[in-house]
Image (spheres, rainbow, N blue to C red):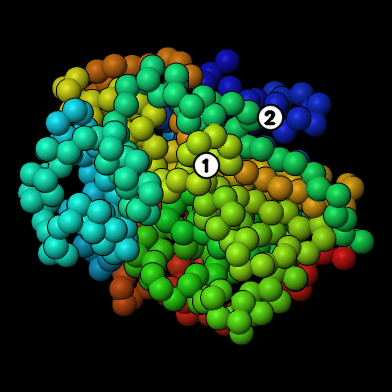
């Protein structure tokens, strides 16, 4: 079985409903070429995660090209590398911030993540360095540091830095063992029941009428909710006003949704958020396990509650912060993708983020299908580290692979005037454009635009 098809089968088997894995996934729509070329089969991860969502949509009654065509390798690769294709008024956007990246230490390498101002400030405070510190000064400071000590100290301080590990060390570690266990997407039925569960309408937009409250940031969670919006869901993203989302990041993954600002520390805003949640079918969060519990938000009976995290909900790192690049560094992916066998490298896209987003969206769709049959609420969870474990287990590997192929101009679409935003076309089969461009961050009212799908 081709690796990308194996991912679809692994996802299906992980649902635990006793149904056989899909055996009618359409063939690929186009040639593979060198899209997302890497030592690890990143393209298969990408293709399989998109196909898993398409297969879930078929179970939800979807019709048309979405379920009749297989994923298109060129289109999927472009979507997974969308941050590199994004243009604002024709200009590329910055990638990682100067203090994000790999740094040598006296006993190995670390990878830091300081794209958000508060993460940058915590890292510099931890190291006793002034706010205006540049990359060269940080590199000089870290050259005398212990990678292991920095990793633990950063976790305690709320900063983000991990020690770069080889694959065998990660697999043998407690967080590595926890990441490799369990299904790709964990789904558990709860005892709460909605009185009249809605029947999904099927067709080209099988999630029409489904309300999704989106409390996610960065890439994986927003990719999941963007995919749900492409299937017809009414998605409302809610962010705190501070810290602000990175503008280009929102424009890259915010298509098809509306976006509003609520400060959950404020009683009035928290009441508004609970009112939105009371009328939601799906809640998607991207915060660390337990991070929202202190606000006391309670999902309604029968809701699907989905959660994406870096390290999973179990194991010693369950409450640690993390991003795609950080998981790659800790899990052994970065050393496997080294260009010279010494300095760590990276996959040619934020593939763990995007793939986990599509897998989480598939889990939400299947949970909605199951709710339509029994009315029960369900918890759905996916983790970047679990997705990385699948990638590390997948064959074949291709050391010394050529540079990843660059998507052509047919892989992007442009909208708007100020700025003119150029983004990758959707990865889903049959979707040549997003249902709507990304709205300006926080521009919408805290209200639903559709009637409820719940009874």
Residue linked to disc 2: 14
Q: Image check: 41 left or right of 17?
A: left
Q: Which residue is drawn at 85% across and 54% down?
A: 192
Q: Mark 1 points at which residue?
A: 318
- Secondary element type, mark 2: helix
Mark 1 residue element:
loop
Q: Which of 263 and 77 is in front in this view?
A: 263
For this orientation, the residue located farthest to the right is: 195
The residue located at (66%, 67%) in the rendering is 296
- Where is residue 310 drawn, in percent x and y? 47, 43
Split into 4 quadrants, where in the image is the N terminus? top right
Q: Nearer the viewer, mark 2 or mark 1?
A: 1
Q: Residue at x 48, y 72 (%)?
A: 240
Q: Nearer the viewer, residue 16 or 317?
A: 317
Residue 106: quarter of image = top left
Determine contact: label 2, label 1, CB under 8 Å.
no
- Rendered location of residue 162, percent (x, y): 32, 39
The quadrant the C terminus occupies is: bottom right
Relative placement, left or right, of 239 versus 273 is left
- Near mark 2 (Cα within 10 A), the count class, few <14, some 14-19 or many ≥20, is some
| 240 lies above or below 106 | below
Number of numbered labels in the structure image: 2
Say which of 425 and 113 sits in front: 113
Residue 41: image quadrant is: top left
Residue 227 visible, this angle: no
- Neighbours of disc 1 within 10 Å: few (<14), some (14-19), many (20+): some
Residue projecting furthest to the bottom: 268
Identified at 55% across, 81% down, the residue is 266
Looking at the picture, tell me which residue is in the foreground, 96 or 50. Answer: 96
Q: Is residue 45 above or below residue 247?
A: above
């Amino acid at each position: 079985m081709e690796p990308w098809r194996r991912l679809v089968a692994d996802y299906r088997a992980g649902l635990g409903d006793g149904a056989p894995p899909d055996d009618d996934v359409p063939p690929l729509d186009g040639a593979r070429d060198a899209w997302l070329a890497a030592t690890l089969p990143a393209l298969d991860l990408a293709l399989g995660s998109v196909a898993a969502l398409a297969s879930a949509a078929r179970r939800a009654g979807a019709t048309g090209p979405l379920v009749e065509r297989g994923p298109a390798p060129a289109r999927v690769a472009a979507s997974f590398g969308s941050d590199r294709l994004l243009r604002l008024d024709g200009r590329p956007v910055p990638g990682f911030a100067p203090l994000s990246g790999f740094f040598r230490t006296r006993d190995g390498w670390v990878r830091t993540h300081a794209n958000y101002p508060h993460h940058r400030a915590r890292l510099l405070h931890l190291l006793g360095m002034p706010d205006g510190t540049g990359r060269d000064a940080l590199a000089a400071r870290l050259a005398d540091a212990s990678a292991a000590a920095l990793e633990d100290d950063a976790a305690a301080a709320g900063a983000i830095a991990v020690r770069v590990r080889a694959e065998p060390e990660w697999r043998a570690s407690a967080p590595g063992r926890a990441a490799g266990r369990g299904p790709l997407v964990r789904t558990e039925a709860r005892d709460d029941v909605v009185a009249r569960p809605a029947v999904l309408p099927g067709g080209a937009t099988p999630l029409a009428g489904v309300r999704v409250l989106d409390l996610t940031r960065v890439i994986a969670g927003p990719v999941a909710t963007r995919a749900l919006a492409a299937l017809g869901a009414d998605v409302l993203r809610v962010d705190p006003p501070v810290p602000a989302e990175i503008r280009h990041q929102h424009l890259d993954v915010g298509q098809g949704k509306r976006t509003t600002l609520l400060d959950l520390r404020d009683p009035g805003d928290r009441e508004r958020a609970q009112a939105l949640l009371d009328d939601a079918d799906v809640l998607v969060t991207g915060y660390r396990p337990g991070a929202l519990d202190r606000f006391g938000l309670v999902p309604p009976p029968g809701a699907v509650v989905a959660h994406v995290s870096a390290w999973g909900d179990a194991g010693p790192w369950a409450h640690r912060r993390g991003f795609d690049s950080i998981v790659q560094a800790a899990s052994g992916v970065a050393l496997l993708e080294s260009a010279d066998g010494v300095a760590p490298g990276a996959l040619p896209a934020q593939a763990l983020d995007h793939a986990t987003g599509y897998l989480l969206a598939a889990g939400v769709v299947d949970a909605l299908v199951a709710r339509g049959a029994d009315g029960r609420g369900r918890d759905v969870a996916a983790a970047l580290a679990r997705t990385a474990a699948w990638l590390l287990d997948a064959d074949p590997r291709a050391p010394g692979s050529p540079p990843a192929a660059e998507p052509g101009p047919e892989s992007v679409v442009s909208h708007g005037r100020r700025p003119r935003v150029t983004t990758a076309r959707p990865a889903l089969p049959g979707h040549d454009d997003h249902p709507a461009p990304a709205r300006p961050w926080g521009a919408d009212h805290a209200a639903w635009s559709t009637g409820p799908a719940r009874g």
